C-alpha cells in the first residue's frame, strides 16, 4: 500500500523545508506537524505541513521581537558579563572582599579612636595641666570625634553604627558640660 498523493514521508517533507528527517519527526512530536501512520511509516500532508512550519516560524519570530523579552535578554546578558568581569577581577587579585575592607577600616578606626582619646592625658602630663583642664580637653576631643562620626554616618546611607566608630549616647551626655564651664 502506498502513501496517498496528498501525503509525503518525513524525508520528502525534510527536503521541501531544508530540515533533517529527525527534525521533522521532532516537530511532529512537538505538535507542529500533523502526521498519519501508513504502511508502517509516518506520512505528512505536504501543503498543511509547509503552512504549519511557516506559522511556527512566524510565532517564534513574534516571540523574539517582543520588546520586553528583548530587554530581559539584554539585562541577563549584562548581568552575566558583570559576573564574568567580577570573577576575572577576583582571579587577578584586583578585588578585595567587602568584609575584609570593612574589617580593616574598623581596625584603623578603633586604633585612631584609642590614640585620640589618649591625647588629653598625654598633653596634660607634658604641660602639667590640672584635672579640669585635662577633662575639658577630653570633652572637646570626644565632641570632635562624635561630630566626625555623625558626618560619616550622614554620608553613608544605611551605615550601621559601630561601637568602634561612634561614641555611645551616655559618653556624649556625660561630657556635654566641661568642668571649667561648671566652675564659672
Image (cartoon, rainbow, N blue to C red):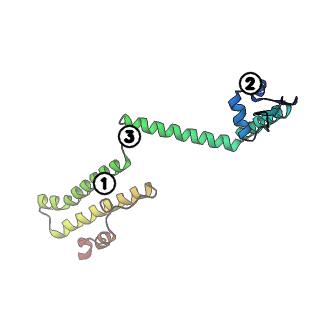
- Residue 106: assigned label: 1
Q: Looking at the image, do the residues carrying marks 3 and 2 touch, with CB atoms under 8 Å apart?
A: no
Q: Neighbour class for label 1 at 10 Å: few (<14), some, many (≥20)?
A: some
The secondary element bearing badge 1 is classed as: helix
- The residue at 45%/58% (across/down) is 158
State the image coordinates of residue 64 (x, y, percent, origin top left): 70, 38
In which quadrant of the rendered image does the C terminus lie? bottom left
Quarter of the image where one finds residue 96: top left
- The residue at 26%/57% (across/down) is 113
Q: Which of 147/36 is in front?
A: 36
In the rendered image, is residue 11 in sight? yes
For label 3, the residue is 95
**Gap between marks 2 and 1, in whole Å?**
67 Å
Query: Residue 137, relative to residue 58: is it above or below?
Result: below
Q: Neighbour class for label 2 at 10 Å: few (<14), some, many (≥20)?
A: few
Task: Please state the extent of the stretch shown in magenta in the rendering.
Answer: 160-168
- Residue 183: assigned label: none
Indicate which disc, 3 or 1, sits on the residue closer to the N terminus: 3
Q: Which of 137/33 is in front?
A: 33
Indicate which disc, 3 or 2, sits on the residue closer to the N terminus: 2
- Residue 18: assigned label: 2
State the image coordinates of residue 120 (x, y, percent, origin top left): 19, 61
The secondary element bearing badge 2 is classed as: loop
Does the segment drawn in magenta span residue 126?
A: no
Indicate which disc, 2 or 1, sits on the residue closer to the N terminus: 2
Amino acid at each position: 500500500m502506498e502513501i496517498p498523493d496528498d501525503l509525503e514521508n518525513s524525508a520528502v517533507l525534510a527536503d521541501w523545508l531544508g530540515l533533517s528527517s529527525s527534525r521533522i519527526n521532532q516537530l511532529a512530536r512537538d505538535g507542529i506537524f500533523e502526521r498519519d501512520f501508513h504502511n508502517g511509516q509516518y506520512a505528512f500532508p505536504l501543503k498543511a505541513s509547509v503552512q504549519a512550519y511557516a506559522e511556527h516560524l512566524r510565532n517564534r519570530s513574534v516571540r523574539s521581537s517582543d520588546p520586553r523579552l528583548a530587554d530581559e535578554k539584554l539585562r541577563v546578558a549584562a548581568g552575566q558579563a558583570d559576573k564574568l568581569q567580577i570573577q576575572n577581577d577576583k582571579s587577578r587579585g584586583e578585588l578585595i572582599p567587602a568584609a575584609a575592607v570593612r574589617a580593616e577600616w574598623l581596625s584603623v578606626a578603633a586604633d585612631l579612636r584609642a590614640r585620640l582619646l589618649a591625647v588629653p592625658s598625654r598633653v596634660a602630663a607634658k604641660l602639667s595641666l590640672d584635672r579640669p583642664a585635662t577633662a575639658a580637653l577630653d570633652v572637646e576631643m570626644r565632641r570632635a570625634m562624635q561630630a566626625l562620626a555623625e558626618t560619616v554616618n550622614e554620608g553613608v546611607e544605611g551605615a550601621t553604627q559601630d561601637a568602634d566608630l561612634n561614641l555611645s549616647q551616655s559618653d556624649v551626655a556625660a561630657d556635654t558640660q566641661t568642668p571649667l564651664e561648671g566652675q564659672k
